[in-house]
Amino acid sequence: MSATDTAAARLASLIGEADSVVALTGAGISVPSGIPDFRSPGTGLWSNVDPIEVAHIDAFRRDPKRFWSFYDQRFQTLGDKRPNRAHAALVELERAGLLDAVITQNIDRLHDRAGTRNLVEVHGSIAHSSCLVCHLRYELEVVRARCAGGSDGVPRCDCGAPLKPGVVLFGEYLPVEAIGQAESLAAGADLMLCIGSSLEVYPVAELPLRTLTSGGRIAILTQGRTPLDRHAAVRMDGDVVDELEAVLAALGLAIPEAPPPEP
Ligand code: ZN
């Protein structure tokens, strides 16, 4: 048995024993979809810009044209990406009744597109943008069309105000409702699967601690070290797709073949 299979078998038995399992995911789960982790040096969208300057709520308010010249590129990059087999593995666990919810810090909406039903997006998502004046919400496709159609590249509400992406920007508060849901899921979990997150950024740094202090266990499937490694009942640090496939296999499950590409 390989080290992955041994760890996968152990994790499968913990999943089987637990009454409540919650997954917490970060950038690492989207890397196989071709979305680089922006914290990796020299890669990612943020390598040539200062995100705190460009993607800050003050920058949006001060200069929406500059803000959207950056954010439209981001929408284009993310809008074409598809869920990968790691996302699909979590859908299968949920379908089998072995996973209660996915909490994610990713804004790429790939869990949603993969079919996860109970999803908490603690940093928001690109799926919608909204007007800060009249609070109307617009779908991604409409926002991209308005970006392309406007004279200055700024997508605007019907009222004329610039739209803001439904993503938590630097300088903004996290969505209260989503954080509350994430905290109560973490506190109620017997087992939290921490996948593809370095567990360093609030709130994902706090949620596994909430599970631990409530008497639950955590498993960490992430490449590179995390501050919580020594608390992990299972620690895996290889390819996230291989690892989740091994866990599913140990549970007698398999990831369904991907549906045909959308037209
Ligand atoms: Zn409006």
Image (tube, rainbow, N blue to C red):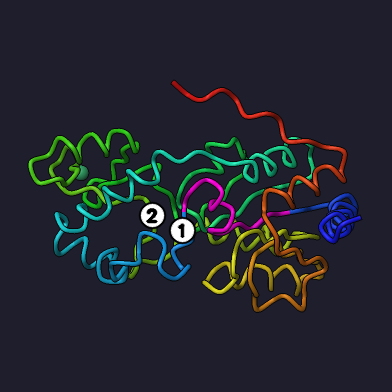
Say left or right for 209 vs 1: left
Q: Please report the bounds of the magenta region as a residue range.
A: 22-35
Looking at the picture, does residue 84 appear above or below residue 189?
A: above
Q: Position of residue 213 (x, y in %)?
A: 75, 75
Image quarter where ligand 1 lies: top left
Q: Which mark is residue 75?
A: none
Q: In which quarter of the image is residue 186?
A: bottom right
Q: Do the residues labelled 2 and 1 touch (CB within 8 Å)?
A: yes
Graded by Cα atoms within 10 Å as few (under 14), some (14 to 19) or many (20 or more), the crowding at tag 1 reads many
Q: Which mark is residue 167?
A: 2
Residue for point 71% across, 30% down: 256
The amino acid beneath tag 2 is: Val
Looking at the picture, does residue 254 appear above or below residue 232?
A: above
Graded by Cα atoms within 10 Å as few (under 14), some (14 to 19) or many (20 or more), the crowding at tag 2 reads many
- Residue at numbered disc 1: 123
Residue for point 84% across, 42% down: 249
Q: In which quarter of the image is the C terminus?
A: top left
| Ligand 1 lies under 8 Å from the Cβ of mark 2 | no
The amino acid beneath tag 1 is: His
Lower sequence index among marks 2 and 1: 1
- Decide whether residue 26 is among the magenta residues: yes
Say left or right for 113 vs 186: left
Residue for point 20% across, 53% down: 69
Looking at the picture, does residue 104 appear above or below residue 255?
A: below
Secondary structure beneath dot 1 equals loop
Residue for point 56% across, 49% down: 32
How far separated are the C-alphas under marks 2 and 1? 6 Å
